[in-house]
């Protein structure tokens, strides 16, 4: 239509009909709404039409959106935010770990863990093996490290194996070691480790990192697709209860033979409408396959990017964790001067593979914990930019635990998002009892540099790494602001310069995460035209003591205006 004709049409209609707002399906008014728009503005009322926000503004102005079929909800001063997003989470593995086998999460110490395992063994006398997930390193001490003998004492007749909540380590009994065919002569697999007594060389029962754990897991019966689906459904309703409606699944296995190959389950749920989460799937880069997997990853992206599911990211699990000395360091561990840690993806492969995947338009999601790995990840992204040119790539580095000061400004200059898990950023027993002796005082100051990266122009996005830690954003936000234990608020402030503001903390879980998920055109703030993905919170975070933020609760979660948790009219 020519411009002249459209002006003519416009003139044919009276001005009043042009300005008349569409009748909203829902109006929320008398609310305290922190919109997270670029002006960080506040509002009183929201109108929702067809799942999208049709108006944000004052109680007075929203009235023009009210019609006779509009559901009008008086929020009585309640606090409203955009719903949260989590940019590093393991919903399927977490959901399965919490719904199958013998879960041992949050048991409160080794004694209780062993008691629980003994109970599972007794209750399930027919099972061919007993397994579960959820122990953590602070359940153990130097004198009582995780060891096969603990499990042998409970049952030595059939395989028992239990994974840590981080998904990096398994402890097996002797029967499980035998079942997997692992002996003292078995060499460590590439990128993994078999635990051995440093003096005798005897197996300890530990298998570390993916390739290590796979020595056993590849021989275990496959998790059924129904178990995967039940796990995902459990995770989805858990996340809704915490106000989370979008995530980046940090490891999605493409290989259909992998125990956690979840793409078909995701797609079925996306097709049927059961997927009530926006999901970016970070497809796992298998270092043992090298470049031969590129076509497979492209095919997976094409096949599995439907509706709320977008398989557009690729995950490089580049190193391990500090606690098991598998995080790769520029300088050796202080209390183990020969150890520099491990790279799960060989350095050369990381450089070449990231350039190829960037060229193919994938987002890079790189797990990097140690100083060397963070540097290599930044180098890899820089190399990709030089080779392919800058584009709207939104690459991100996850965990970012230990960053050499020279690398801090590179997040901003390379436009790389720092994907932090703020829940870890205080002096808990991991940090004080385990990490401090490993790193020495200077490097302890480099830990979780959330504030420094932000001050130097880097983007922030937050996630939980659930089921490693709670997926609840409120305690994590409090820690980002205080760098203290959110329960007691009495621990020493850990790296005080790294504290951020409440507004920054909210942004990390909303617009910052939405940007990283390529969802910021549609979500991450409360603005006209975006989806009505909103939460109602039981207190105004800006009006309570900071130490109370961790206690806040989500009352209602809306996805496209639909109540997926709680009820508006109560
Ligand atoms: Zn993770």
Image: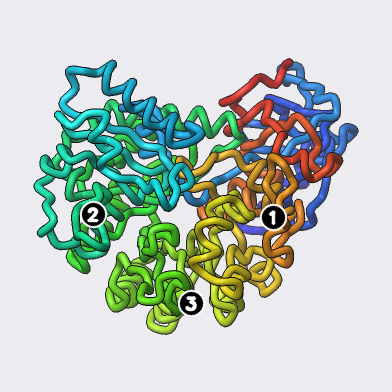
SS assignment at label 2: helix
Mark 3 nearby-residue class (10 Å; few <14, some 14–19, many ≥20): few
Question: For mark 2, what is the residue?
Answer: 212
Q: Nearer the viewer, residue 99 or 377?
A: 99
Number of on-image labels: 3
Q: Please report whichever mark, 2 or 1, sits nearer to the chain's N-terminal start.
A: 2
Question: For mark 3, what is the residue?
Answer: 390
Question: For mark 1, what is the residue?
Answer: 483
Q: Residue at x 83, y 36 (%)?
A: 32
Up/down of 208 relative to 49, above or below:
below
Up/down of 256 relative to 456, above or below:
above
In the image, taking residue 567 as reference, residue 95 lies left or right, namely left
> CB of mark 2 within 8 Å of CB of mark 1?
no
- The picture places residue 558, in percent across and down from the top left corner, at 62, 30
In the image, taking residue 285 as reference, residue 140 lies left or right, namely right
Mark yes or no: residue 254 visible: no
* Picture quarter with the C terminus: top right
Q: Residue at x 33, y 54 (%)?
A: 283
* Picture quarter with the N terminus: bottom right
In the image, taking residue 153 as reference, residue 53 lies left or right, namely right
Q: Residue at x 41, y 37 (%)?
A: 134
**Residue 315: which numbered mark, if any?**
none
């Amino acid at each position: 239509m020519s411009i002249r004709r459209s002006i003519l049409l416009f003139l044919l209609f009276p001005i009043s009909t042009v300005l008349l707002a569409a009748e909203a399906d829902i109006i929320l008014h008398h609310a305290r709404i922190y919109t997270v728009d670029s002006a960080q503005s506040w509002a009183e009322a929201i109108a929702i039409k067809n799942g999208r926000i049709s108006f944000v503004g004052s109680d007075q102005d929203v009235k023009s959106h009210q019609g006779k079929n509009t559901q009008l909800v008086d929020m009585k001063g309640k606090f409203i935010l955009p719903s949260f997003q989590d940019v590093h989470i393991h919903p399927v593995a977490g959901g399965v770990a919490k719904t199958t086998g013998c879960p041992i999460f949050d048991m409160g110490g080794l004694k209780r863990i062993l008691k629980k395992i003994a109970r599972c063994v007794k209750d399930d006398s027919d099972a061919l093996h007993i397994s579960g997930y959820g122990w953590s390193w602070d359940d153990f001490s130097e004198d009582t490290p995780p060891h096969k003998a603990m499990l042998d004492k409970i049952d030595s007749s059939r395989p028992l194996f239990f994974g840590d909540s981080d998904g990096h380590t398994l402890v097996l009994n002797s029967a499980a070691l035998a079942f997997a065919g692992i002996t003292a002569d078995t060499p460590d697999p590439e990128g993994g480790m078999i635990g051995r007594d440093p003096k005798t060389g005897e197996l300890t029962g530990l298998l570390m990192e993916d390739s290590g754990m796979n020595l056993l897991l590849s021989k275990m019966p496959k998790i059924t697709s129904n178990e995967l689906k039940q796990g995902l459904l459990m995770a989805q309703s858990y996340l809704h209860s915490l106000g989370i409606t979008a995530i980046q699944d940090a490891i999605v296995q493409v290989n259909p033979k992998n125990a956690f190959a979840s793409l078909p389950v995701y797609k079925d749920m996306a097709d049927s409408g059961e997927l009530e989460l926006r999901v970016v799937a970070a497809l796992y880069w298998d270092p043992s396959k090298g470049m031969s997997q590129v076509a497979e990853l492209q095919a997976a992206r094409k096949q599995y990017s439907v509706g709320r599911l977008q398989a557009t990211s690729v995950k490089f699990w580049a190193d391990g964790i500090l606690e098991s000395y598998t995080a790769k360091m520029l300088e050796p561990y202080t209390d183990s001067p020969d150890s520099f840690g491990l790279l799960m993806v060989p350095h050369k492969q990381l450089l070449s593979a990231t350039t190829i995947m960037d060229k193919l338009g994938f987002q890079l999601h790189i797990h990097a914990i140690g100083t060397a790995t963070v540097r290599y990840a930044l180098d890899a992204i820089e190399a990709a930019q030089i080779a392919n040119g800058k584009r709207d790539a939104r690459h991100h580095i996850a965990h970012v635990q230990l960053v050499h000061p020279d690398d801090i400004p590179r997040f901003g200059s390379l436009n790389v998002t720092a994907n932090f898990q703020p829940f870890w950023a205080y002096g808990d027993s991991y940090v004080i009892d385990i990490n401090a002796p490993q790193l020495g005082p200077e490097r302890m100051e480099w830990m979780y540099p959330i504030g420094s990266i932000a001050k130097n122009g880097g983007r922030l996005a937050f996630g939980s790494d659930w089921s490693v830690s709670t997926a609840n954003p409120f305690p994590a936000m409090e820690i980002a602001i205080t760098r203290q234990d959110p329960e007691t608020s009495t621990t020493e402030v850990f790296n005080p310069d790294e504290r951020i503001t409440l507004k920054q903390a909210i942004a990390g879980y909303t617009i910052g995460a939405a940007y990283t998920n390529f969802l910021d055109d549609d979500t991450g703030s409360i603005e006209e035209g975006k989806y009505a993905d909103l939460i109602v919170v039981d207190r105004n975070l800006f009006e309570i003591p900071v130490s109370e933020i961790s206690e806040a609760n989500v009352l209602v979660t809306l996805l496209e205006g639909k109540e997926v948790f709680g009820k508006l009219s109560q």
